[in-house]
Structure formats: C-alpha cells, structure tokens
Amino acid sequence: MPFFYIVRSLDKGFFDLYHACMVPAISHISAARFWLSCGQQDIPRHFLDSSSNSKEYPLIADRLDVARSAFSIEQDEPLHFLVSGQNNRRILEGAVSHSINGELPPRSILGHSAGAKIGIVSPEIRFMQMACLLSRVDAIRYGSALCGRFAAPADTGKLPARKPLTNVHVIRKHLEVSPRMSGRKQASAVLPYIIENTRSPREIDVALFLSLPIRKGGFGLPRPAINESVLLDKPVRTRNQYGGTGYIESFECDMVWHISGKTIVVEYQGEQYHERQFSIHRDSIKRNALIEQGVRVFTLSNEQFRDFEQFKRFATLLKKTLGVRPRSRISDPEQRQKSLHTQLVRPFTL
C-alpha cells in the first residue's frame, strides 16, 4: 500500500474545521482523467489538510493556469473544481465549480507542495464521485484502473508502468469515514468486484468477465491472482536481451489459480504482443518451463476476447480445467453474458 494513503479517523469537530478551510481542488471528470493518465513522477504526495488550509483560498481566475500546469490539463478542457460550500462557488470562464455534498474525510485533497493554493481530490474521493456518474461495469473498470499498475495517457497507446494509486482496503476505509458523502452507496456496491494489480485495461476486462457472478453476466469462476509470480521447481538458464546468460527462478503470470493442488495460468496476448523477437523467445521459455513442472497454461488473444463465441469456448474449457461448476437459477445466462461482453469490448474512456 502506498505510504501516503494511510487513513486515520478524526472526530466531527475536525470535519467542520476542514470544510471551513478547504483549498479549491480539481475534481470530477478533470480529476478522473488526471489520475488515469499521470505517471509515477507526477503523483501528488502532499495532503492539504489542516496545516495547509489554515485560511480559505477562494477560487479565482489566475489559479486556473496554475492548476492546468500543475496537473497537466489541456487548455481547451473545462476545469472542474470542488469548493467548500455554495458560497464559494464561482462563475469563471473555463471552470465549473461544485460544492461538497456531505462530509469530506481527512487526507482527501492532495497537492504538489504542502503550501499549495490549489489541490486535487484523492483517488478514493474520485472513485466515489465517478461511481455516481458511470454504469456499474464502468465504475468497476475505473476503480480497477486506480488499483492497477499502469497509466493510460489519452494521447498514446502505450501504458507506462506505475505503482497502484490506491487499493480496495484503502477505498473501503474512506467509505467508512464518509457516511453521508455522495456516491458512497454506489461505490460500496461495486467495490467487491474491483480487480487489483493489473498491468492493462484489457487484463481488467478479461478478469471481470471470468469472475463476475453469472447473474451479473460473468462466468462465475473463482477470482484469479493477478500478475502473480510462479516459482519454478528448477531455475531455467537462458540468455537475456543483451546477449548474456542467467537463471530465472520464477515467472510473473497474468492470471493464476491454485485449486486442489493444481496451478492453472492464463496469459493474455494483447494487440502490442510480441513486438520484439526477444519477447517471443522469453515467452516460449516461460511457457515450456511452466508446463514442464505441471502447470496448465492457457493463452488468450485480443481477437479471442472480442469474439463472444470464441471466448465462451475458452471460458468453458478453463472452467472444466479448474474443476468448478458455477450455479445460478437465472433463466438467461447467455443473454446476460452477451450484454456484459458488449460493454467490455468497448474501450473504457472518460
């Protein structure tokens, strides 16, 4: 868990003080896009709590450019702000202000410096806000992206690696101390289905489709461990991309199940898969080494995922290999699966 997401409980008196002394904070869709796309070096690490908020900093026009620069927001994109109370809302060109509805917990606003006069709502608060605006499936996808190990810049197809911005445990703590905050109910409903530790949006989609209950359109399989390292019984000697040689003692696998003494692995092959010859070599070594020690390895391509009938055959084979028999009394499981599939093959955008 990132060190700066340690949640502490404070009494109602502090909430009142915190509301009265809050800096304007980038919020709603502006904050949502920032948190999805920011790289590890861009993550704000200073909480703007009571020490920073000793007086009110009103939302004024000259802070808009400061906010755009600090949080890498395009000039033609309207800035959405959160302010403390209706009296602090302003009509400014290029800005939309929202007042707090309910109590805002401590450690909910961050900035690039402790003395900042502009902040941004935390990923946990942003998740609660977005849970009100998105469908349940997209709310799960958004929460999973916050808990993932990738950034998703809007202007590139690449997915830079980063540490998770938050996790389910920390989000749950925020929900517990926000009993009257807008979005809490919707966020609580989807929180159990969030997929943590993924390296791409499609890993989220595949894991969701496999593990969501049948009544929600999924295949009802046990939730896999995501990007888990599988230890090899015997280290494998192989060459590296620089021409040298070394030994590999474990491989990180996209999805892993440990059931009845068996290990089953699914490797997802995305559209950018195997761009380089060395990747082909390493993945061949990986697959052979895992099979050699009795691990059942499945591969899934993006085209298989996009074709419902192909994915259904894949999921059925995986279910048999896992030895599980999900049960449901609903009369239209395939219709629900097709509906969910239609949502998941659509790229998630804000």
Image: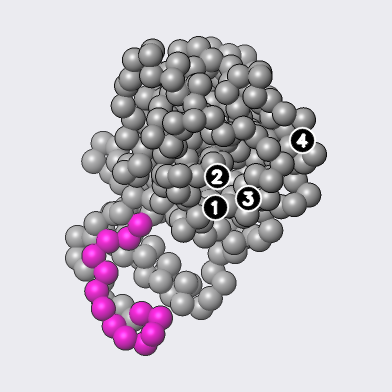
Q: Is residue 192 above or below residue 308?
A: above
Q: Is residue 18 magenta?
A: no
Q: Is residue 206 among the parts visible in the rendering?
A: no
Q: Relative to 32, is 197 on the left or the right?
A: left
Asked whether disc 3 touches disc 4, contact meaning CB atoms under 8 Å apart, the reply is no
Looking at marks 3 and 4 on the same chain, the residue that comes earlier in the sequence is marked by: 3
Asked whether disc 1 touches disc 2, contact meaning CB atoms under 8 Å apart, the reply is yes
Residue 92, numbered label: 4
Quarter containing the C terminus = top right
Indicate the position of residue 189 as horizontal and vertical percent values.
51, 19
Q: What color scheme is it?
A: one colour
Q: Amino acid at mark 2?
A: Trp
Residue topped by disc 1:
38
25 and 321: which is toward the camera: 25
- Kindly state the secondary structure of the residue where label 3 is placed: helix
Looking at marks 4 and 1 on the same chain, the residue that comes earlier in the sequence is marked by: 1
Q: Is residue 249 magenta?
A: yes
For residue 24, what is the image quadrant?
A: top right
Indicate the position of residue 73 as horizontal and vertical percent values.
66, 50
Q: CA distance from mark 1 to mark 3?
A: 17 Å
Residue topped by disc 3:
66
Q: Where does the magenta region start and end?
A: 240-252
Q: Is residue 209 above or below residue 177?
A: below
Looking at marks 4 and 2 on the same chain, the residue that comes earlier in the sequence is marked by: 2
Q: CA distance from mark 3 to mark 2?
A: 18 Å
Residue topped by disc 2:
35
Asked whether disc 4 touches disc 2, contact meaning CB atoms under 8 Å apart, the reply is no
- Kindly state the secondary structure of the residue where label 4 is placed: loop
149 and 104: which is toward the camera: 104
Q: Is residue 76 among the parts visible in the rendering?
A: yes
